[in-house]
Image (cartoon, grey):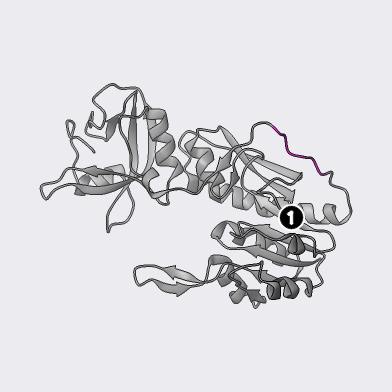
Amino acid sequence: MRLAFLGTPDFAVAALSRLVADGHEIACVYAQPPAPRGRGQVLRPSPVHAFALAHDLPVRTPASMRDPAEVEAFKALDLEAACVVAYGQTLPREVLEAPRLGAFNLHGSLLPRWRGAAPIQRAVMAGDPVTGVQVMRMTEGLDEGPVLATATVRIGPLDTAGDIHDRLAAAGAALLAESLPAIAAGALPEVPQAETGVTYAKKIRPREARIDWTRPAALVDGQIRGLSPFPGAWFEAPSPKGPVRVKALGCRLERAVGHPGEVLDDDLLIACGEGAVRLLRLQREGRGAQPAEEFLRGFPLPAGSRLA
């Protein structure tokens, strides 16, 4: 099929790679404009943009798809369909209706739960036992279109948002690739989303990353796993030179009682408002992520220490 692909982050690369491997004609790849990245804040292309360049695919990075010139350029591509995966812009009706079959979004949740920008992180933070990816026909509303195909993924008690991201990206790439021929044949029914159970996955705000040990352990556990690896839930640990910021990137729920923020043993069992979490993976500022045992060799936090 002659397609346009609109996507930006790592999550979308797997789908684009699969479409290329399957022999579809990618008339154009659209991605968000290059953004400052790294310590030097050098302008760098997004993962999808970089993939397109590496595979000699035509690529455009408009600041807005509502620009009349961009709309006309999109119409001129003479597409059968558009595939959208975490693009990061809302698309006007003229763009959605330009391809002969329409525009189809691969979304990382089981709609109508977690419409919006951060569905994977929000699902883990909320303690959802299962999530998934769905192919939906795009409409002008935010992730409101009818669903054509679904793949589910379980969220285990130790899974981080990073773990689920990778599984959903792989499952989504396969689902989109398998759906396109059926869409072209008119063989996939379009199922309207339920009107009940709608939730929105708002962008993660910086203030959500600091751990409040007075909250129940189940909420702290979801926060740590849901914000791992990025942006990373963090706390302050005591040191001879003063408090040190540490990211908690993995944990496990356990039963224990203590003052919130108290280290209950020599292996990073931390008391919460109700229950406790055992920290399994951590990262100090300016250092790489480490398993707990390695972290403790360089930064001891013995029983009785207090985290803030």
Q: Which residues are magenta?
A: 190-195
Judged left or right of residue 179, residue 44 is: left
Q: Nearer the viewer, residue 266 or 142?
A: 142
Q: Does residue 15 lie above or below 71 as drawn?
A: above
The quadrant of the image that shows the C terminus is top left
Q: Does residue 215 lie above or below 25 as drawn?
A: above
Question: What x and y, as percent, mark residue 250?
Answer: 39, 41
The quadrant of the image that shows the N terminus is bottom right
Dominant SS in magenta = loop
Q: Does residue 251 lie above or below 59 as drawn?
A: above
Question: What x and y, as percent, mark residue 74?
Answer: 74, 71
**Circle 1 residues within 10 Å: few <14, some 14–19, many ≥20:** many
Judged left or right of residue 1, residue 114 is: left
Q: Amino acid at mark 1?
A: Phe
In the picture, residue 36 is in which quadrant? bottom left
Q: Residue at 14% of width from left, 46% of height from top?
A: 239
Q: Which residue is label 1 attached to?
A: 104
Question: What x and y, as percent, mark residue 98?
Answer: 80, 65
Q: Nearer the viewer, residue 137 or 71?
A: 71
Q: Residue furthest front?
A: 68
What SS does tag 1 mark?
A: strand
Q: Residue at 64% of width from left, 32% of height from top?
A: 197
In the picture, residue 65 is in which quadrant? bottom right
Q: Residue furthest left?
A: 240
